[in-house]
């Protein structure tokens, strides 16, 4: 197991064991749900995908939305793309270190976006709820 995988597993464990998340969701499920549904653009997943692509992660995001293999990203890249302030805010929500949040998101976002974009297309905001519920109930967030 690589150092990155070990760090991501530790971050997922910390997030999943955190009890501050509302609605009984694990910490990372809450964070990811918030990012996907409540993106600051008002466009949910489409806004998140746009922001990540515009922040220099275009090839990676295209691979996640597409039907091929998912290109990886680092926690540092996620922090740069989302902004240090957003990462700090997310970390405070669940009470862990910002680097852990960024690492966990780097590990999970490629797979989550891939699962939420069946057929290689971002669903409209209203059509995302069913896919997100399915992802949350699938055991996807177990570290």
Image: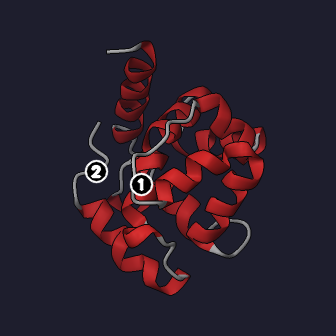
Q: Is residue 134 above or below residue 57?
A: below
Name the residue located 38 percent from the left edge and 45 percent from the top edge. 19
Q: Is residue 85 left or right of residue 116?
A: right
Q: Earlier in the sequence, mark 1 or mark 2?
A: 1
Asked if residue 76 can be seen in this view, the reply is yes
Numbered tag placed on residue 112 in the rendering: 1
Numbered tag placed on residue 140 in the rendering: 2
Decide: marks 1, 2 in contact (CB < 8 A)?
A: yes
Badge 1 element = helix
- Residues packed near mark 1 inside 10 Å, few (<14), some (14 to 19) or many (20 plus): many
Pinpoint residue 95: horizontal percent, then vertical percent: 54, 36
Pinpoint residue 36: horizontal percent, then vertical percent: 54, 64
Q: Quadrant of the N terminus?
A: top left
Q: Is residue 88 above or below residue 111?
A: above
Report the Cα–Cα distance between label 1 and label 2. Answer: 8 Å
Name the residue located 33 percent from the left edge and 70 percent from the top edge. 133
Pinpoint residue 85: horizontal percent, then vertical percent: 77, 43
């Amino acid at each position: 197991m690589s150092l990155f995988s070990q760090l991501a597993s530790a971050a997922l464990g910390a997030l999943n064991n955190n009890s501050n998340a509302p609605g009984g969701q694990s910490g990372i499920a809450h964070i990811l749900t918030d990012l996907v549904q409540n993106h600051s653009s008002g466009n949910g997943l489409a806004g998140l995908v746009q922001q990540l692509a515009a922040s220099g992660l275009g090839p990676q995001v295209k691979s996640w939305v597409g039907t091929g293999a998912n290109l990886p990203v680092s926690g540092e890249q996620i922090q740069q793309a989302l902004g240090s302030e957003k990462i700090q805010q997310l970390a405070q929500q669940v009470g862990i270190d910002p680097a852990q949040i960024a690492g966990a998101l780097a590990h999970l976002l490629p797979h989550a976006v891939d699962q939420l974009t069946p057929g290689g297309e971002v669903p409209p905001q209203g059509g995302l709820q069913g896919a997100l519920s399915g992802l949350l109930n699938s055991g996807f967030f177990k570290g």
